[in-house]
Image (spheres, rainbow, N blue to C red):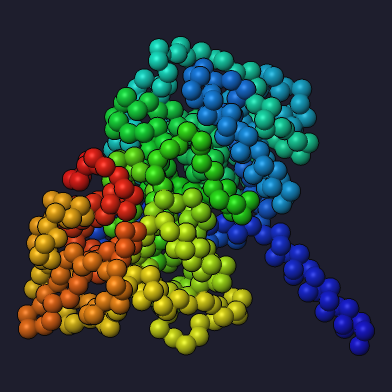
Amino acid sequence: MYRNLLAAVLTFLLTVLANAQTLRISTQERVPAEWDKNAYSLVNHIETWQPPETAIIVCDMWDKHWCPIANKRFLELAAALNPVLCNARDKGVLIVHSPSNCMDYYKDFAQRKILSTYRDKNIAALISNQKLPAESKIPFPIDTSDEGCECTPKSRNYRAWTKQTDLIPIKEKDLISESGEELGVYFKQHGIKNVILTGVATNMCVLHRPFGLRNMKRLGMNVVLMRDMTDTMYNPEKPPHVDHFSGTDLVVEYIEKYVCPTIVSTDFTRQKQFRFTGDKRKRIAFLIAEGEYHANQCLPDFAHELTLRNFSCDFALGVPQMEGAGRHNLENLQILEDADLAVFFVRRRALEAEKTAMIKKYVASGRPLLAIRTSCVAFDANKEKIIDEKSQQVLVQWKEFDRDILGGNYQNHYEHLKTGTDISIVSGMENHPILKDVKPFNSLNWLYKNRPLRSEKAQVLLLGSNPNKPVEPVLWTNGDRIVYTSLGHWDDWKIESFKNLMFNTVNFLLKEKNQKTTSP
């Protein structure tokens, strides 16, 4: 009896230990949309990685860069990156330091010597400085023809570095290499399958180096970019003439489409992702989890245009489906911590208590919120109880969100009409800032029933009508920080007045002035 009990306890402890050692990685990528060959959907995947099968490559975090402005940013990044590497190292992840053109400095380091004999002509033949096939004929999103330095007067490009910055110490069990061949052979011989790239600069070294994203992809690695622990060489004087950090975001978007997925340091630290002190852009958090209106295509497209207007856009994603395993989840909710605006397009999700608390904390903070279409039932799973299929814990619903926060009164919808819903402006509201350059239009949305609204503060701006049906409110403010619209069909985003409506709402909620309305 005691022997059986001891065996059961040991089995339990081993199971707990094994689970504690695995890495839960939340990847983000943009994949071709099934319904539009010219569009991409932003998707999230939860992956379980084993630390002994995982490596982080630190790219070109030198002791000095030739561009003073870039050098200042890189040092700030290094100070933030080292705790992430320490955390990963403690979990059993291999750390590889790759300061290019510095191998002579490290020639006598044991961490360098260990790789010097790793050679394989077949692996070497895979290393290339060319783009991946998926990138062929795709224009790069930023112009770096001036090498990306923002200094005035321009700095001279020279080899200013001799080694990696001391802000990122090299530990005993780490490795040092700038060779894609060496690392490719070592990774394959030691069972490393997952490779994370971090460091600088994303649009140059992180992509192009022999050990960079493209070549790790060619070697068959499950490679990702740690998107918050990187930077670009980009001068806003060059096209597309956006803020430096918006330029970085555009490069990350390009990588997610054509090269590989990305992650954030939160997967290791459980803290909010890194943000440069010089990044003063307003930050918008998009919460997307619905499977009917293509929100994971439409909102990222909208966010792209906001990025071109120098807003910072982050995403918390759920699976784009209405039924099935994994549906009741939202990843990366830490983006709400320093968001200036939250945009919800969520449908009937129940969440873990901790995640619901993060959302409620944001709403209670008084920061603004734009809720779209199905968000009136965002956290109402339409069931008495939802139990998580893995943890078996009861998930939390927030059925009062529509009534208490949005001021709405959702009571289902009228029938689907091929003729759509006619959208008109409430008399007397024509000069409201949200309605700038907005004209009456027709939407393919079926009309939601919301009469009467349940907030004394609600101000209706737009009405929707179907033949022989009562007129319904389709967009209203609830005070000066909440806007809800029951519009949001995928075809709405092709209508100029609707897009103006969305840009205007962002500007209104963020109290931005003199922002462009029409697309960049």
- Residue at coordinates 69% horizontally, 27% vertically from top-left? 166
In the image, taking residue 213 as reference, residue 418 lies left or right, namely left
Percent across and percent down for residue 391 are: 61, 76
- Residue at coordinates 16% horizontally, 51% vertically from top-left? 436
- Answer yes or no: is residue 325 visible: no
Q: How many marks?
A: 0
Nearer the observer, 227 or 470: 470
Nearer the observer, 99 or 394: 394
In the image, taking residue 459 as reference, residue 356 lies left or right, namely right
Percent across and percent down for residue 214 are: 47, 39
- Residue at coordinates 54% horizontally, 43% vertically from top-left? 274
Outermost residue on the right side: it is: 2
| Image quarter of residue 438 | bottom left
- On screen, residue 416 above or below 474: below
- Residue at coordinates 23% horizontally, 40% vertically from top-left? 514
Nearer the observer, 301 or 459: 459
Percent across and percent down for residue 425 are: 12, 64
Outermost residue on the front side: it is: 456
| Image quarter of residue 171 | top right
